Image: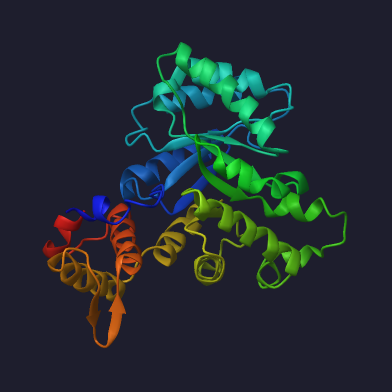
């Protein structure tokens, strides 16, 4: 039996997304990000930004530009999403009407910022579905930014919504919502990994995502000149907080994030050895090098191979039949 059938009979399989989500707002940066994606392949997603990317007074034209770029030949892999204005903003429905109306079949996902609770997200999804169905697409995957007190309090209910694919932590807005009670150094390392309220928020989001098979996406790193800092933040995000995806806000951050969040060769070789032995035993318990393994660990190692495949890591021939 194939691992995708044998290992998830009693468990919700997780969603699979590229490990890096690169944000771009201006036309210059959006076009540059598309060029980079065409060169590297779909190993990272691009999010066009209508919320912070549009200049005041230019919101309508910016949404039209986003739709034009989504429909262009430069969108080779259909792995570009859009962050629209927040649900209570007067430009929210304008963004949806313009972008879905012109490029419903090209959208990888839509990002909803500054949400308050699951009820509000559900209402937004209903509006999005109404528009997308009118343009021939049953539904569009939804990503949600968790950056308010109320959204964090309702994070499990938000993650449980079927159309949700990913939850991201908006650290800047979350810190500022405490009106100075959290110091500004908690927006960056090392403070973001030591302040208890920040870590609580990160862990709650990650736990909700893993409970419902969604992808947790780690917040931005504001440093972009020192790749070691970016790589260090990404490594801590996965090792200490269980995040499997991370924002990039500068082209220099893309490769360090992908490298840090992708499996290492030693992990891949170990996974192949364990899965090969497990398949010979019809996915029953085995022991390798004095350690016991069963379906719980098989799931871990099979998912590791899936992540390597998504990162376009060249895998040995004996790994291909697992995928």
Residue 228 pos. (x, y %): 51, 72
Quick check: 225 above or below 115?
below
Residue 277 left/right relative to 293: left
Residue 250 in sight in this render: no
Q: Residue furthest bottom?
A: 290
At x 46%, y 22%, the residue is: 68
Quarter containing the N terminus: bottom left
Residue 6 point in image, percent of width and height:
25, 55
Residue 104 vertical position relative to residue 225 in the rendered view, above or below:
above
Q: Is residue 120 above or below residue 102?
A: below
Displayed quadrant of residue 56: top right
Name the residue rendered at 66%, 24% in the picture: 92
Q: Where is residue 275 shown, x and y percent of the image?
A: 21, 67
Quarter of the view holding residue 35 = top left
State which quadrant residue 115 falls in: top right
Q: How many marks?
A: 0
Left or right of 96, for residue 109? left
> Viewed as shown, does residue 135 lie left or right of 309?
right
**Placement of 286 over or under 134, stated as above or below:** below
Residue placed at 41% from the left, 59% from the top?
258
**Residue at point 61%, 54% (across, down):** 205
Residue 230 lies, in percent from the top left, at: 54, 65
Q: Residue furthest top?
A: 134
Scheme of image coloration: rainbow
Q: Does any portion of residue 178 appear in the rendered image?
A: yes
């Amino acid at each position: 039996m194939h691992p995708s059938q044998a290992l998830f009979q009693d468990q919700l399989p997780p969603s699979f997304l590229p490990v890096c989500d690169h944000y771009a707002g201006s036309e210059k940066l959006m076009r540059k990000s598309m060029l980079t994606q065409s060169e590297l392949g779909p190993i990272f997603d691009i999010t066009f930004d209508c919320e912070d990317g549009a200049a005041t007074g230019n919101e309508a034209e910016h949404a039209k530009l986003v739709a034009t770029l989504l429909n262009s030949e430069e969108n080779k892999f259909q792995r570009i999403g859009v962050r629209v204005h927040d649900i209570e903003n007067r430009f929210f429905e304008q963004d949806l009407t313009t972008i879905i109306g012109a490029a419903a079949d090209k959208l990888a996902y839509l990002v909803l910022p500054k949400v308050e609770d699951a009820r509000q997200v559900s209402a937004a999804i209903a509006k999005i579905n109404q528009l997308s169905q009118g343009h021939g697409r049953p539904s569009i995957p939804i990503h949600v930014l968790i950056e308010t007190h109320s959204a964090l309090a309702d994070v499990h209910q938000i993650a449980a919504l079927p159309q949700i694919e990913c939850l991201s932590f908006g650290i800047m807005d979350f810190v500022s919502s405490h009106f100075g009670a959290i110091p500004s150094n908690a927006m960056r390392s090392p403070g973001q990994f030591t302040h208890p309220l920040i870590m609580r928020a990160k862990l709650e989001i990650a736990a909700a995502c893993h409970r419902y098979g969604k992808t947790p996406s780690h917040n931005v790193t504001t440093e972009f000149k020192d790749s070691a800092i970016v790589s260090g933040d990404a490594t801590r995000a996965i090792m200490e907080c269980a995040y499997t995806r991370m924002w990039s806000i500068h082209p220099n951050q893309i490769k360090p994030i992908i490298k840090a969040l992708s499996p290492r060769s030693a992990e891949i070789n170990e996974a192949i050895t364990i899965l090969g032995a497990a398949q010979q035993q019809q996915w029953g318990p085995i022991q390798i090098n004095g350690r016991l393994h069963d379906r719980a660990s098989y799931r871990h190692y099979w998912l590791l191979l899936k992540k390597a495949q998504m990162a376009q890591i060249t895998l040995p021939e004996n790994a291909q039949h697992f995928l």
